[in-house]
Image (cartoon, rainbow, N blue to C red):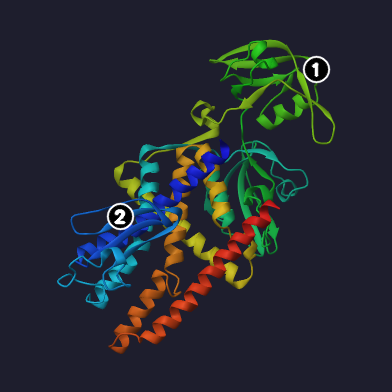
Amino acid sequence: MDILFTIFSFILLISIIVGIHELGHFLTARYFDIHVLKFKIGFGKELFSFKDKQDCSYSFGILPLGGYVQMLGENNIPQENKDIPLKDRKSYLDASPGERAAVTVAGPLANFVLAIFVYFYLAFVGTIQLSTYVGEIIPSSPAQKSGIAVKDKIIEIDQQSVNAFNDINLILSSRIGDTGSIDIKYISKGSEALTSIPIKEWLSGNDQTSPYLALGLQPFLPALVGQLQDDGPAAKFGINEGDLIKSVNDQTIYTWQDLSKILSQLPNQLIELEIVRDGTPQKLILETSSYIDQKGVIKGRIGILASNDLSKWPSEYTVEKKENLISAFFVGITDTYKYTLLIISSIGKMISGSISTDNLGGPIQISVLAGSAAKAGYVTFLSMIALLSINLGLLNLLPIPILDGGQLLMIAIEKLKGSPVSEAILEYSTRVGIVLIVSLMVFAFANDIARFI
């Protein structure tokens, strides 16, 4: 079922971002009265197709890895369209260079509009995010060596304010491949502190570790019961979902990580828990169960899972972000702008060699991420749609023949020289473009395979 869910999530994600991209081309072509022959999502054998009153064919291919809009005059007319009277219809070649440029750029532009809409929607309906409190410091990590401790609250990174843990990861992501230092301002025991963590070609290899984990930081996760395992000790001895565990055998519990560590050391033992239920402190006695970990060590557990419903967390450990209609619109634009800059910077670092090209992901990696994002909830899934939509928009603007950016380059050359680019140059550039794109896809696919070996 997990595989089917991942496949479905991948198809849905790709269909949305590709469909919006091609819709941008389609609507702009229709606006300039350029006749559209075909609108297709996916490649290969068609699962279904139909025509509208203007003799445009719409279809969905069995392989959902792309799509296209075919306009009259852009390519050879397919067999099924040969009997359609096309003499009086405007072709792509009849359009002015400005009109063709508008049709070409409309696809990537639609992807940016999609991202803006997603970020606008999330800001308008509101989201609850992790706060910037530190929940765990990985031993011997840069963060521990710098003096940051559990329950410290990070307020600035590199002179940029942070309000939620997502902000931390975004800023840290922009430093991948850099040499220098990461400056962190935080609140510790009521006082502000500043630390500087030196970095050298930071995360420039093929390490897929999240930037915050690379520094040794973990978000603050309260010891809040999210789910009970059937027939586990917690379910048997009266623990409920939503209980906040405050201590185990009089040892104070601050985070879920604290709870896991203490319980793992108490296999098959009677323990006393202090919990808070609906604001009321209570004490419970229960007997832990046990399991054997991968190293053959017996560890204790009580059969509970952490809560991932942030709306039920103590308010000090979450941040609610909700904007009015106007401010949400500006959030949509600024978030899209921030992630666009991050992606452009990452591409630049990859080209310069400061970030390994092994980080490039293909369809397998995208499908895995799509499945994980869908399981995490609609907010995470929508955020991934926005991010990949920006990626697709930027990719298509690269000046590579067969991509939108390559077509824009040809139109610009035509405008400058005052005549169309010769058929020989177009054919040669198309072949070069195909080789480049296929090579990129093969390389990304090879990276995907390498991650699973």
Q: Amino acid at mark 2?
A: Tyr
Could you tell me the amino acid type at mark 1?
A: Asn
Above or below: residue 33 compared with residue 142: below
Q: Which residue is mark 2?
A: 58
Q: Secondary structure at mark 2?
A: strand
Residue at the left extreme of this rendering: 88
Whole-percent x, y for residue 369 in the image: 55, 47
Choose between 12 and 77: the one closer to the eye.
77
In the rendered structure, the answer to whether residue 29 lies left or right of residue 301 reads: left
Residue depicted at x 47% and y 59%: 391
Gap in angstroms between the C-alphas marked 2 and 1: 63 Å
Residue placed at 58% from the left, 52% from the top?
365
Q: Could you say where residue 255 lies in the image, as x and y percent from the top left? A: 66, 30
150, 291: nearer the viewer: 291
Q: Quadrant of residue 121?
A: top left
Task: Return the x and y of residue 44 as percentages of the image width and height.
Answer: 44, 58
Count of marks overlaid on the render: 2
User: Can you identify the residue that label 1 sits on?
Assistant: 268
Res 23 quadrant in image:
bottom left
Say which element carries label 1. loop
Q: Is residue 87 above or below residue 186?
A: below
Q: Visible in this render: residue 381?
A: yes
